Amino acid sequence: VVREVAEMGAEVGASKHAVVREARCSELKNQPVCIKIINLESLGDEKEVERLHAQTKLLSNMAHENVIKYHCSFVCKHELWIVMEYAACGSCELLMRDPRGGPPRPLREQHIATVLAGGHFLLPLLGYYG
C-alpha cells in the first residue's frame, strides 16, 4: 500500500468532487503516479459512496496492458486517495478538448480506432465485475 508521497506534483485534472495530481511515491521507487483525491464529504448520499466503492473495486481487479495500472486506494481524513499509474499522454477527454475553450470536439477516426482496438477486451471484464 502506498501511503508515502515523496513529491506531490501539479494538478492535472479536477471535477466537482475530486482533484487529480501527478506525484512520485518513494514506495514505488519514485516512479510517476497519478493520485485522484476525492472529497468524501462532498459526495452527498450513500448511493454515490457505493458507486465509488464499486468503481474502486473494478479498478483493483483490472490487470491488462491496455488499462492504466491501479496501485492502491486509502482514506486519509475525509478524502479517498486513488493511486494509479501516470498516463503522460492524457485521456480521451483531453483529445476532445477544444484548445480555444469551445465545446468538446469529436474524436478523430484514428483515435477511435486506437481506443476500440485496445479496449475490446474490457467487455467480458465489465460483464464479470459489473
Image: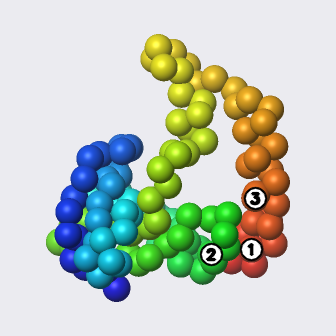
Choose top left, top right, bottom left or bottom right for residue 32. bottom left
Q: Which residue is found at the position 67% from the left and 73% from the top?
A: 64
Q: Residue at x 54, y 27 (%)?
A: 97
In screen coordinates, is 119 left or right of 60?
right
Mark 3 secondary-structure assignment: helix
- Look at the numbered disc 2 and give the secondary structure of its residue: loop
Q: CA distance from mark 2 to mark 3?
A: 12 Å
On the question of residue 104 being in view, the answer is yes
Residue 42 appears anywhere in the view: no
Mark 1 touching mark 2, by CB under 8 A?
yes
Give the x, y percent position of residue 65. 66, 69
Disc number placed over residue 62 in the picture, else none = 2
What residue is at 33 percent from the left and 55 percent from the top? 22
Q: Earlier in the sequence, mark 2 or mark 3?
A: 2
Please provide percent x and percent y for residue 43: 35, 57
Label 2: few (<14), some (14–19) or many (≥20) C-alpha neighbours in 10 Å:
some
- Name the residue tied to disc 1: 125
The quadrant in which the C terminus is found is bottom right
Disc 3 versus disc 1: nearer the observer? 3
Q: Choose top left, top right, bottom left or bottom right for residue 123.
A: bottom right
| Disc 3/disc 1 C-alpha distance (Å) | 11 Å
The vertical placement of 55 against 116, above or below, is below
Mark 1: amino acid: Leu
Closer to the observer: label 1 or label 2?
2
On the image, which quarter does residue 48 sit in?
bottom left
Q: Amino acid at mark 2?
A: Met
Decide if residue 47 is on the left or right side of residue 34: right
CA–CA distance in space, label 1 to label 2: 8 Å
Place of residue 94 in the rendered image (x, y in percent of width and height, measured from the top left): 53, 36
Name the residue that disc number 3 marks: 119
- The image shows residue 16, relative to residue 74, as above or below, that is above
